[in-house]
Image (tube, rainbow, N blue to C red):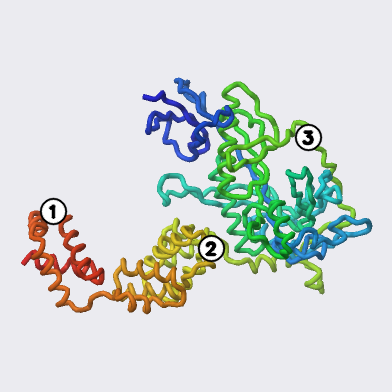
Amino acid sequence: MAAPVQRWSCVGKRWVLTYVDGGSRHGRGAAIGFTSRRKRGQSSVAQQPLITAQKSRKGEHEWAAVVGLEIHAQISSNSKLFSGSQVHFAAPPNSLVSFFDASLPGTLPVLNRRCVEAAVMTGLALNCRINKKSLFDRKHYFYADLPAGYQITQQRLPIAVNGSLAYSVCVGKKPSQVSTKTVRIKQIQLEQDSGKSLHDEPRSQTLIDLNRAGVGLLEVVLEPDMSCGEEAASAVRELQLILQALGTSQANMAAGRSLVTLRRHFQRGGDGSPAETQEGQLRVDANISVHHPGEPLGVRTEVKNLNSARFLAKAIDFEIERQIHELENGRKILNETRSFDYKLGCTMPMRDKEGKQDYRFMPEPNLPPLLLHDTASLPPGADPQQVINIDWIRERLPELPSETREKLIQQYGMLPEHSFALLNEVGLLEFFQNVIKETRAEPKKVTSWVLNIFLGFLKQQNLTVNESPVTPSALAELLNLLDRKAISSSAAKQVFEELWQSKGKTPSQIVSEKKLELMQDQEALERVCHTVMEGHPQVVMDVKRGNPRAINKLIGLVRKATLSRADPTVIKKILERKLSS
């Protein structure tokens, strides 16, 4: 028998050692949440946070993890934050660069009104206090894709502060076991994005693409109120939904472009988006530390540029385990920046932060203070195009995801986890609502078909809702056939598969071609049932002796004889009547 080992598991807000022996676990409390899995053959100590179990004093091996996030969302705007250059993904390199973006002498910034309105709208949706006066600053650092040598941001007085974000996280094995948590928002600030460095390792060179330089960003800083990767990923997903509902950012999380991809594409004369590229408009930096409960916070590390909620959760949980393992073995945690290698499933050091970098923040001399107004402070006779009214934006806030989920639960009697599933997939809620409008089927049945059958096919084929070959009208017609008992449930699934494979056909046409209609002739069905019972006397005897499963076999035989065109419920009633007579 293998020797028992211990794993670090997140229990509530604390990380504790959980005993693992064979397939069972025993520990102080139920172990839920993250458990690290490593590939066979990995020998790095940092990647193997398992140690031989030794009996320890109560509380000695309890750790508390602290997680804070800095989230950069690209603002949905036709032009950049301080210039008139267009914002367009996958344009040819350096084709969308103004004189200001390239930092040519004598050029001045002109603030984009749309970006300011997006920041105010986001702040209001996240329960922030909007500062009527905010300031712009220069953050100095040198990098090849930052031509000016500084970034314009809002360090001293950002546009929004002191907000909150409510999110839901699963606290058990069942999807219905959901707990609502809240993370505080320190601030939301406007800032420029940098350009992009494309590293060509085979040629030992780096090329610069300034198309992204100057694109408007919203930086949302979340306080360190989270304790594991699942909480952080859930908070980011909720923020994504809010930004998408507001229209302030598309908030897609995806990998960027590789230099090899770009070179191959544009050398072939391409001028659009290379097939291999993906758009990413949301990037997350995670700050992580661990400490014993009741003691001061530990030294934190920062994991940079996480572009997937799944990778965010994995990176945070790995880093928590790594830090605990280092401290348990008498080593120190370095204040450093790390990256996440998704192939290996571990974080890797990038650079240390022991010597704090001096960004030499200073006021931006070319931009005056940004002044916002509410209805009470609006100057008389002010031109609406020259001022931004906070109350006007507040009145026009769209319905937020939390409100939409509550409405779905109240209107359709939907389970909370189903309302989350409908909103988490882009376009799925609209698809569901369009089906509801065109069908007489119960909302519960529509929900089941959309989330189980329809979404299952999408996942299997790796398609988005907009790419589905089955339209809401087609699914509604199919559910109408099922609702009026024109076809059976199994036949309905067969029709759906046919709809998925052959465009242009309606469910009614497929039912007619495949002869999938339910038998409406009651007498003919009774004759089939009688024939089946006569041909299987032993099964009939088993039913009469009280075997409840035997009747299911008779139902299956009748359905086989009718080519699945008989309703199992009707068959069961006929068989029960005949068996009792």
Labelled disc at residue 89? none
What secondary structure is found at the residue carrying circle 2? Answer: loop
- Label 1 secondary element: loop
| Dot 1 or dot 3, earlier in sequence | 3
Q: CA distance from mark 1 to mark 3?
A: 77 Å
Q: Which residue is mark 2?
A: 464
The residue beneath circle 1 is 547
Tell me what residue is drawn at x 41 percent, y 77 percent. 506
Compare residues 109 and 401 and report the one nearer the observer: 109
Q: Which part of the image, by quadrant, shows the N terminus?
A: top left
Q: Residues within 10 Å of mark 2 (few under 14, many from 20)?
A: some
**Whether residue 381 is situated above or below residue 342 in the rendered picture:** below
- Relative placement, left or right, of 553 versus 48 is left
Residue 382, given in percent of the width and then of the height, sits at 81, 72
Label 3: state its secondary structure: loop
Q: Which mark is residue 356?
A: 3
Mark 2 or 1, which is nearer the eye? Answer: 2
